Image: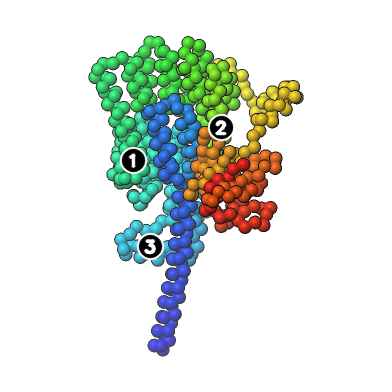
């Protein structure tokens, strides 16, 4: 009997340890896969780079439209990919393994692994960042605060990102004291990182702006000088208040007024000012700058074809055609958001807790409110366009214009206007047209003219010619050798294959360029 008991105990312990070992390995593989996919999706270092560029533009070079276009392109590739690969499906065995791991971590005074919570955190971060880059700062700030309160591991990249970007949102909302606290916390918790570097940069800009403002007040400078200093320091609310005290505004002051309104989200009011500045003939330099803002707004922030058509025509009159060509090039590289569509389509799962269901519904409601606000601003913008008697451009109007042109002229124009380019298909279904694809480590850089879009290499599914003209796509490798095919596909191993050839795949790590 005793032997049977020991034999049974041995069998149970053997079974337990075998199951535990297998479960732990499974959980560790889940953790590894999740970590790799998370890093590819979030692009934390790239987000710091774009924020740094945004700060430099905000405080140092407000009218550098090329820099602004590049930032828009880069931001569209951050946290803007399909998250299906991050959907954790924890089986009973995985949950058992996670329980064993967390029990051991608890005994060693280490924080527990929270893979499912990390997944929810990433979705919240995606949403908050989308609100930030579309200038919905109050919604972004609210979500960043919720994230800061819910993230359990205070030294994670998610916490660093949250503190830094929350501070930026608070600056844009005019709440500079609160922003200083968030940014200082980021510096204290993450010394020597790119997060701390950007937080320090933003604080230095704020302190320099405040110092200039105090100096001007102490020296009793004119409202004109004070308004310009406030504008340069990014204090747009105070800029508008100071300009209101002036009886008559110069063209430069009117431009500063319009820029301040635009940064505060009063886009339709800003557009009205810009249009007047474009139409005036006294100051050509201001007219050019105002027209570039209209091009940026019409293409990136509040898409409006009528406004873009008007701005193109004015750019030609002002001799600034290169600007609208560059802006249009940049627009073609901006990726449409997938997180919003994904969240709105998400059904409330039965396995969610009451709190999780409430949060998901709140995010959906925030999205709907944001979309309604955008629609309202779009309606206001359309009213401004109508009031200023700008010809309306409908979706079908461009086709109608082409159809009335003499046939020979249309043929001559169409041939050079359709250049052969590369068409890159991404794993989430989106397609991007570009001139060249450059591979740098885990990044694929899609180049179009002066602009480049940085994406995780793993997101690229295929590269082919944008039109069927028999032109092959060339792969350039480390050794400089080239292989050609009308279409290249990245297989499950990451290597590149020619679907119409039996030639061995080209190893992923050897690829440097895709070119025509």
Task: Mark 1 or mark 2: name the one nearer the start of the chain.
Answer: 1
Task: Mark 3 or mark 2: name the one nearer the start of the chain.
Answer: 3
Residue for badge 3: 102
Work out whether 229 lies above or below 74.
above
Instruction: List x then y, in percent, for residue 68.
Output: 46, 31
Task: Pick whichever, 410 or 251, lies toward us.
Answer: 410
Residue for badge 2: 329
Instruction: Choose mark 1 or mark 3, whichever is in front.
Output: 1
**Quadrant of image for the N terminus:** bottom left
Residue for badge 1: 197
**Residue drawn where x is 59% and y is 26% of the image:** 305
Left or right for 352, reference 182: right
Task: Pick whichever, 400 or 479, lies toward us.
Answer: 479
Work out whether 288 lies above or below 145.
above
> Which residue is most to the left?
218
**Please, what secondary structure does the residue beneath circle 2 have?**
helix
Instruction: List x then y, in percent, for residue 363.
Output: 47, 42
**Quadrant of image for the C terminus:** top right
Q: Are marks 3 and 2 in contact (CB under 8 Å)?
A: no
**Residue drawn where x is 41% and y is 80% of the image:** 9
Work out whether 467 lies above or below 239.
below
């Amino acid at each position: 009997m005793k032997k049977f008991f020991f034999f049974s105990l041995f069998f149970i312990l053997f079974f337990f340890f075998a199951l535990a070992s297998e479960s732990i390995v499974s959980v560790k593989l889940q953790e590894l896969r999740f970590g790799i996919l998370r890093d590819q999706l979030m692009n934390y270092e790239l987000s710091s780079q774009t924020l740094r560029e945004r700060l430099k533009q905000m405080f140092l070079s407000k009218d550098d439209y090329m820099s602004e276009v590049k930032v828009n392109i880069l931001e569209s590739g951050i946290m803007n990919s399909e998250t299906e690969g991050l959907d954790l499906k924890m089986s009973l065995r995985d949950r058992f393994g996670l329980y064993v791991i967390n029990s051991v971590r608890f005994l060693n005074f280490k924080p527990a692994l929270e893979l499912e919570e990390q997944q929810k955190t990433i979705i919240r971060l995606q949403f908050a960042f989308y609100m930030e880059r579309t200038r919905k700062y109050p919604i972004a700030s609210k979500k960043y605060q919720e994230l800061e309160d819910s993230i359990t591991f205070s030294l994670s990249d998610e916490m660093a990102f949250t503190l830094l970007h929350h501070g930026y949102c608070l600056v844009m909302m005019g709440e500079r004291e609160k922003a200083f606290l968030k940014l200082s916390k980021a510096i204290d918790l993450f010394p020597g990182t790119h997060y701390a570097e950007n937080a320090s940069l933003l604080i230095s800009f704020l302190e320099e702006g405040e110092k200039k403002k105090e100096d001007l007040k102490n020296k009793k400078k004119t409202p004109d000088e004070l308004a310009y200093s406030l504008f340069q320091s990014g204090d747009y609310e105070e800029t508008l208040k100071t300009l209101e005290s002036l009886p008559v505004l110069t063209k430069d002051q009117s431009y500063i007024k319009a820029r301040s309104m635009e940064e505060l989200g009063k886009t339709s009011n800003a557009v009205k000012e810009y249009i007047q500045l474009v139409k005036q003939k006294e100051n050509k330099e201001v007219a050019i700058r105002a027209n570039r803002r209209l091009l940026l707004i019409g293409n990136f922030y509040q898409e409006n074809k009528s406004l873009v058509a008007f701005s193109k025509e004015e750019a030609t009159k002002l001799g600034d055609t290169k600007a609208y060509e560059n802006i249009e090039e940049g627009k073609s590289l901006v990726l449409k958001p997938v997180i919003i569509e994904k969240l709105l389509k998400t059904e409330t799962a039965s396995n969610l807790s009451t709190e999780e269901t409430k949060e998901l519904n709140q995010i959906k409601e925030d999205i709907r409110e944001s979309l309604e606000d955008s629609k309202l601003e779009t309606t206001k913008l359309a009213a401004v366009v109508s009031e200023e008697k700008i010809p309306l451009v409908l979706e079908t109007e461009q086709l109608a214009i082409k159809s009335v042109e003499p046939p020979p002229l249309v043929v001559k124009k169409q041939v050079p206007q359709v250049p052969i380019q590369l068409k890159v298909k991404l794993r989430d279904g989106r397609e991007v047209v570009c001139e060249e694809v450059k591979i740098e480590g885990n990044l694929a850089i899609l180049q179009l003219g002066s602009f480049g879009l940085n994406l995780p290499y793993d997101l690229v599914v295929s590269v082919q010619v944008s039109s069927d003209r028999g032109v092959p796509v060339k792969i350039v490798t480390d050794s400089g050798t080239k292989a050609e095919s009308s279409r290249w596909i990245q297989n499950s191993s990451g290597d590149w294959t020619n679907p119409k050839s039996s030639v061995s795949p080209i190893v992923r790590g050897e690829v440097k360029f895709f070119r025509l």
